[in-house]
Image: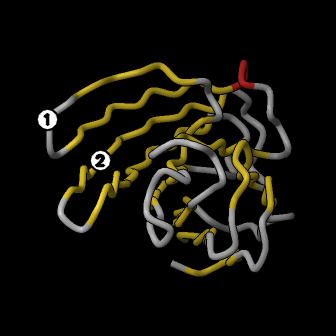
């Protein structure tokens, strides 16, 4: 695994673009650590490819489980919503993490399929925490190779990090 993009924000931003990624990889692995100014405990942010923000070109599902009250749910979410972030209702030091794998990003004959695991928390106080885990799958309909990745749909704060690794 080779690090091919690394960005830790030093100021607030509502979108991040990797620019043109190097080629020669069979898969990408993405790590994000996200918190935003969204007024919520947790929220989904968007991950798109090649500047394509048209949700009709994506299909995504999410299954989530909350630890404390055993809530379970499954949703069909707007196609580009594939990453999880913490909002302002959480403790100021709480970030949510997403790990995503994109299979065969350089193929010209196959749709792009990604799977993600996301972890967040609702941190009420030092004695009350609700941990959450989500499994997200995303299908990108076009068969064009992925040349860049965009993270958007949230006002990301300083300290958020976005890393992309290439797997040969």
Residue at image position (44%, 56%) is: 90
Residue at image position (54%, 51%) is: 87
Quadrant of the rendering where the C terminus is positioned: bottom right
Camera-side residue of 37 and 76:
37
Camera-side residue of 91 and 5:
91
Residue at image position (66%, 53%) is: 37
Residue 9 spot, x, y in % from top left: 72, 75
Picture quadrant of residue 126? bottom left
Residue 107 spot, x, y in % from top left: 67, 45
Q: Is residue 128 above or below residue 95?
A: above
Colour theme: secondary structure
**Numbered mark located on residue 93 in the image:** none
Number of marks: 2
Badge 1 marks a residue whose secondary structure is loop
Q: Is residue 164 above or below residue 82?
A: below
Q: Earlier in the sequence, mark 1 or mark 2?
A: 1
User: Which residue matches tag 1?
Assistant: 70
Residue 44 spot, x, y in % from top left: 55, 40
Camera-side residue of 143 and 15:
15
Q: In the rendered image, is residue 26 in sight?
A: yes
Left or right side of 141 for 139: left
Left or right side of 126 for 140: right
Residue at image position (74%, 47%) is: 152
| Neighbours of disc 1 within 10 Å: few (<14), some (14-19), many (20+) | few
Badge 2 marks a residue whose secondary structure is strand
Camera-side residue of 68 and 133:
68
Picture quadrant of residue 54? top right
- Contact between labelled residues 2 and 1, with CB atoms less than 8 Å apart: no
User: Which residue matches tag 2?
Assistant: 132
Q: In the rendered image, is residue 110 in sight?
A: no
Q: Is residue 10 above or below residue 164?
A: below
Residue 156 spot, x, y in % from top left: 69, 59
């Amino acid at each position: 695994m080779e690090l091919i993009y690394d960005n830790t924000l030093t100021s607030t931003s509502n979108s991040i673009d990797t620019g043109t990624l190097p080629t020669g990889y069979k898969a990408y692995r993405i790590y994000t650590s996200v918190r935003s100014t969204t007024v919520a405990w947790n929220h989904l942010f968007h991950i798109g490819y090649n500047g394509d923000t048209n949700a009709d070109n994506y299909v995504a599902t999410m299954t989530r489980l909350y630890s404390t009250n055993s809530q379970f749910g499954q949703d069909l979410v707007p196609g580009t919503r594939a990453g999880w972030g913490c909002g302002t209702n959480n403790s100021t030091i709480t970030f949510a993490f997403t790990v995503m794998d994109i299979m065969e990003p350089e193929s010209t004959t196959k749709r792009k399929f990604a799977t993600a695991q996301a972890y967040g928390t609702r941190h009420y106080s030092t004695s009350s925490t609700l941990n959450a885990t989500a499994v997200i799958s995303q299908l990108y309909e076009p068969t064009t190779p992925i040349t860049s990745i965009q993270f958007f749909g949230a006002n990301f704060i300083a300290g958020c990090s976005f890393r992309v690794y290439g797997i040969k």
